[in-house]
Structure formats: C-alpha cells, structure tokens
Amino acid sequence: MNSLLNLRKFLAPEIIFGNGARKLAGQYCNNFMLDKVIIVTDPGLIHHGWVKQIETSLSDAGVDYVIFSEVSPNPRAEETMKGAEIFRANNCSGIVSIGGGSPMDCAKGIGIVISNDGHILDYEGVDKIPIPLPPMIFIPSTAGTSADVSQFCIISDQQEKVKKAIVSKSIIPDVALIDPEITTTMDSYLTACTGMDTLVHAIEAFVSTASSKMTDLHALHAISIIGESLPETINQPLNLTLRENITAASMHAGLAFSNAVLGAVHAMAHSLGGYLDLPHGECNSLLLEHVINFNFDAAPDKFKIIAQTLNIDIRGMNNTQIKNALFNYIRQLRNTVGITKRLELVGVRQADVITLAKKAVKDACIHTNPRKANLRDIELIYEEAR
C-alpha cells in the first residue's frame, strides 16, 4: 500500500512553441470544429495589436468570435461571471485567450461556469469540477504565469479580499500556442515580475512534497534559464533569443508546478495579492528569499542543488552558509532586475500581518510546502519581509 503513495501523474496540454505560434489559433479552432469563440484578453493586448492578429487568424479560418477584455490585473469573480454571460449570449462553443495570467485565469473561470453552472467561487479547492470545460486555446503574452500549461486557476474574491485557488486537471487548456514574440511588448518591470514568478514556480515545485523525477527535470531547467537569462532580458528587451529563453523557462516551470504543486510563497502571495490587489509576480518576488530561509532546513539537499543550478559557488560551505548564500543571491537578483521594494512599501502594515497569515494558512498551496507552517510561522515570515 505504501508504494502507492509514491505514484505521480503528469498532465500537460498540446504545446506549440516558437515565434509565430499565435497564427495557428484559427487552425486549432477548426480542429475542434468551433464555429464561434470568445476571445478573453485585456486592453493592453488590444492596444499592442496582438488581438487583431488573432482576429485575423480566426477570420481566415472561418471562425466567428466575440471579444471580452474587461479583466482586471487580478481577475475578479464578477468579471468571470460576466464573461460567462457573454459566452452564453453569443452561443460560443469554445474559448481563445491571449494574455498574461489574468485573462487566462478568467478564461478558465468562464469555462468552469459554462460547463458546471453555479458561481465560480463554488469551485475553490482541489478536483471540484465534475464536468469538462469547452475547448480552450491559450496564447500567453507574458513569460511567468504559466496558466497556459497548468491546472491552476486563481480568482480574486473582492468580498473576502483574497485570491481563491481552483485546482483541477479539467482546467488544463487543450492547446498552448507559446509565442515568444508576443512577450516583446512587456515593459521591464512586468518582465522582471513574471520572470521572478517563473523562478518561484520552479523552486517551489522542486522542493514540494509532491515533486517527482519528472517535475524535477522541468524545474531545474527553468531555474537554470532564469538565472542566466533574466537580467540580460531586462537590458535587451527586443532580443528574441533571450525572450525565447525566458518563455521556455516559464513553460518548463509551469509543467513542473502544475504537477508538483507549490508552497508557502504562493500561499502567502495569494493572500497578499488578494488583500491589497497587488501584482502576483511582485508579491512572489518580495517573499521568496524569506520563505527559502524558513524552508531550507527541511530540504537542505534540494536547496543545495538549487544553489548549484544558479551557479552559486558553494564549495566548502556548510548548510548555514549555503542558506545564506542562496538568500543573498535571490535578493540580489530581484534587486538587479528592478524589484527593490519591501512589503511595507507596497502597503502592508504591521496590523495587516495577522489577517494575511490567517488567509495564507487556508490556501491549497501550503499543503505541499516542504516544512509544515503554522499561523505564527507565516506571521513571522510576513514580518521579516516587511
């Protein structure tokens, strides 16, 4: 019986990776015999002209569409419900989403509601979606969230001021058209935040209690790429080779965390981002080194591998020295790419800490953190990060 506890599954969508992948949107709609789709996106992608290219691809393939772009940076439950109404009112049969994590998570939420009825927040938790979603074709515009390959959907509950995690194999997109060219219109701070988000995904997946040899391969590859390429990408934003690198890192990290789950960084970031409506990648960045400090002694061998993968010279170091070196590396990396704040500077007051901690300990991601964390533990990490 114990041997069954060591079994692992690995889920992934069909992935097409490379410059120009976005132009296959119409073809894949035809493959699924979709006659009309809802395009879920945001105003920024419309402004940069990427959505127009998707419209052209769909029109050339004879696929009708309606556009829904009323998506906040942290997608809200009410926006998801409105998107579902538009899907129904227009008799759509599938979903195409182009954007970062916010439009893609909103698109997943729309699919959940369309197939299962009810309210989107009814499905918070793990494996609570009984009916499969309509066909979903996702085109990521950032290199970090990995919503295009994962079984996670994060929706903001404005009433409780917290992000709710929905986890299910049912919400893995059918197709991910991963096109590095689209990421060239990200500004430097968004590039930094999403790149650090990729690093957090990979590190948390690697040390997760649900990790496996399969997920470890993807996680370590993502860690290596981000360490080598993220600072250069900030300095050379139009360098397509570098954009391909960090987009590939996002894909690998997504495949890792989708199957190994995450940890305390994400549990705390979901609480923080929902409470103060902050960018997810920024929240992760400000918490990462402090959670590593907390977790290190629970998985020292794995953190040693992470340090080596980041090309930190740890020869002759004991565990305490390696922990400090990794802590300093992460802090220096995020400062180098322009994420220099502390929690206090993004609006976290001392009085907020207990509220944030109470929400974080209820998050699904906390369960696969390598070290058990109680309420006081989480409070102390928030306090240290202030």
Image (cartoon, rainbow, N blue to C red):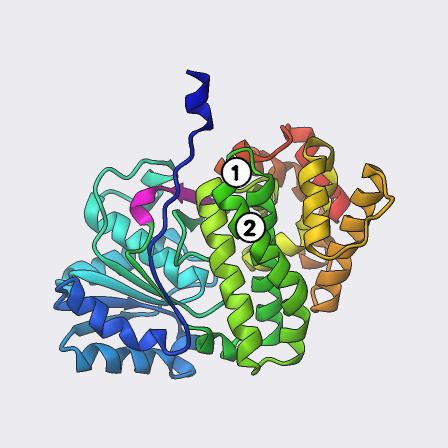
Q: Nearer the viewer, residue 99 or 386?
A: 99
Q: Is residue 288 visible?
A: yes
Which numbered disc, 1 or 2, marks the residue that appears first in the sequence? 1
Question: Distance between the Cα atoms at labels 1 and 2?
Answer: 10 Å
Picture quadrant where residue 60 is located = bottom left
Q: Is residue 86 left or right of residue 155?
A: left
Give the residue displayed 59% in from the left and 63% down from the top. 195
Helix, strand or loop at label 2? It is helix
Magenta-colored span:
164-171
Give the residue displayed 19% in from the left and 80% down from the top. 59
Q: How far across and how far down the image is residue 201, in percent? A: 55, 51
Helix, strand or loop at label 1? It is loop
Marks 1 and 2 close (CB-CB < 8 Å): yes
Q: How far across and how far down the image is residue 376, in percent? A: 69, 30
Q: Quadrant of the N terminus?
A: top left
Q: Is residue 248 left or right of residue 108?
A: right
Q: Is residue 58 magenta?
A: no
Q: Is residue 167 magenta?
A: yes
- The relative height of residue 145 versus residue 372 in the rendered view (above or below) is below
Q: Name the amino acid type tagged 1.
A: Ser
Give the residue displayed 45% in from the left and 51% down from the top. 255
Q: Nearer the viewer, residue 211 or 358?
A: 211
Which residue is situated farthest in the top direction here?
1
Give the residue at mark 2: 219
Q: Nearer the viewer, residue 306 or 46?
A: 306
Give the residue at mark 1: 211
Q: How far across and how far down the image is residue 199, in percent? A: 60, 55
Q: Is residue 275 visible?
A: no
Q: How far across and how far down the image is residue 86, in percent? A: 21, 63
